[in-house]
Image (cartoon, rainbow, N blue to C red):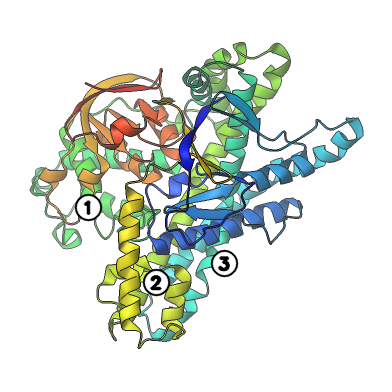
Amino acid sequence: MLDYTFADADFADTGSADAGAEADQVWGRSLLAPLAPGALTPFTGSLLTEVAARAWYLYYDRLGFNPTSRARRVRSVAGRPYVNLSLSALLDAENAGLEPPSFRLDGTVRPLLAWEKPGFFANIKLSRGAKKIEETYKDLQQELPAITEKAAAWHAHVSGLRWSQAEVLQVMEEIERIGAAALLPYFAARHGLETACRRLLHLLGARPAAESTALIVRALGEVASTIELDMAHRVQTLGETGAAQQEVVAWLDVGDFADWEQTLPVGAFADGVHAFMTSYGHRGLHEGEIAAPRWRETPTSLFAAIRACAHMAVAPAPLSADSLSADSLSANLLSADAQPLLAAIDGKARKEAQQLVEQMRKLISLQSHGLHAFSFILAGTRRWALAAGHEAMTDHRITALEDIFYYELEEVKEMMTGEWNVSDRSGIHAAAAARRGAWENWRRIAPPALIWGERAARLQTTGLPAAGGARTGTAVTVESITIENGAVESAALPSDAVLVCEEPESALAALLPAAAAFVAVQGSPLDPLCACARSLGRPGVVATGSPFATISPSSRVTVDGNLGKATIL
């Protein structure tokens, strides 16, 4: 069980539009954390809160759990989205017999809600709900290609618009509906992962958090079918291809990528880059923030990783998914890696633990591909927001394009439809300035893991294992390689780079082949990047807390992913 501690004071919404939440509810940040690598701008925060709330409803409605449409399901606090854990646990318990999780706060174990183990006959009825959850995972896995195709088609449609006022208004009405359907597979997978992980932690008893987490991480091992691993393999291959073309190495070393599509040397490397951009050009670092550019717009970080792969010795190839069938791969890794976990659990519960591990491995893949489906919605919404910003600039409703991200989604809609009086330009401008100031303050706040009523509860740890192994290297913060149109020398990755990030977000997988290890200030071993790191053999530690939040670039760092320890030397 993980340990949490209450902050000294009650936690206020610090400027969020969602102030005044239910005082008896418990809210968690981890479910949506991979989509919020930092404080989100008001536009992105309001959009993700609404879309996630709709995805929550779609999930429980699909299960037939009769979710109430009146209760608040997701709230935004200091630019971070929090999911209502109390409401989710209540529906899971009442309809599927899932025991609500407990949390240890300041040494006291607190159940999320009161619960009694169901009797024999009640359990028969509840088992139908549990079976429905399993069936829904399988159904979503089968439906995911069609969901992804639909999201990609919407993104392609939006990307081809000339953005007349009518088109701006039309797309405006589509975003939340299409976005919720695309987010559903990710939401279901992530919720299932967190539920299973908490159950495993419970079965492991009173062991230290790092020890229990290490056992779970070792049991999960590699997961071959993830988007992150495909991105990483492609970047490594591009580095190897580029190394064979002298003109490509010279082009990468110059580092002028402002017009990369025109200056890219022709040949196999260019073909590979265009193929990568076709699949992943709509993605990028901090992609959960709609204000952040995508790789096709600003590929500096991507080419920095490719350049490093071209210059470094080729890393040992990770286990290929093609060498084994999915079933034999799963069985091989489970028998090799799950035994320490199973040995640490009481004999009566080992069968349940093994089933949980098998389920989690499948859900990690569903989570990865679900997140990729939703990434098309994020990129398409960025296109719309920028088009709305250009429209608002024509009559000086806003004075800078990036100001559009400091208004909430409904406010942008009001701006586009004329409900927000265009003559009130001073009020519109003042709102953007105030929101920008609030957002800058949010960025400096260390977000709590839980909000228990209105009290902040922080995870009490200096690190959790995410991917096994140990390395010592040079710290490279993600912020240092996300500069716009900067020279690659200022974003170069040393051969022993240890990536330091706030959250282990999915798109960082493109940088992992050029890194020795990674460290995340926040995050969970369940995050998609961690599965990729395990497959690539890159050690990783998450949830290190404040020391790495202010680390100086080029600091020497030791990462021990087996023990969950990261040390600044």
Q: In x, y percent, where is residue 18?
A: 52, 59
Vertical position of residue 239 compared to residue 412: above or below: above
Answer with the quarter of the image where residue 20 lies.
bottom right
Q: Please tell me which residue lies in front, 375 or 57.
A: 57
Horizontal and vertical percent position of residue 566: 32, 23
Which numbered disc, 1 or 3, marks the residue closer to the eye?
Answer: 3
First reached walking from the N terminus: tag 3 or tag 2: 3
Pick out the residue farthest to the right. Answer: 121
Quick one: 212 or 331, which is closer to the camera?
Answer: 212
Q: Are marks 2 and 1 in contact (CB under 8 Å)?
A: no
Callout 3: SS? helix
Q: Which residue is mark 2?
A: 384
Q: Are marks 3 and 2 in contact (CB under 8 Å)?
A: no
Image position, residue 471 (x, y; %): 28, 21
- Which residue appears at 69% of the width and 52% of the height? 60
Can I make out residue 286 in this image? no
The residue positioned 53% from the left and 19% from the top of the image is 212
Corner quadrant of residue 204: top right
Distance between the alpha carbons at the discs numbered 3 and 2: 15 Å
Q: Say which residue label 3 marks.
A: 177
Q: If you read the primary sequence from the N terminus, does the residue marked by circle 2 or circle 1 appear first? A: 1
The residue carrying mark 1 is 270
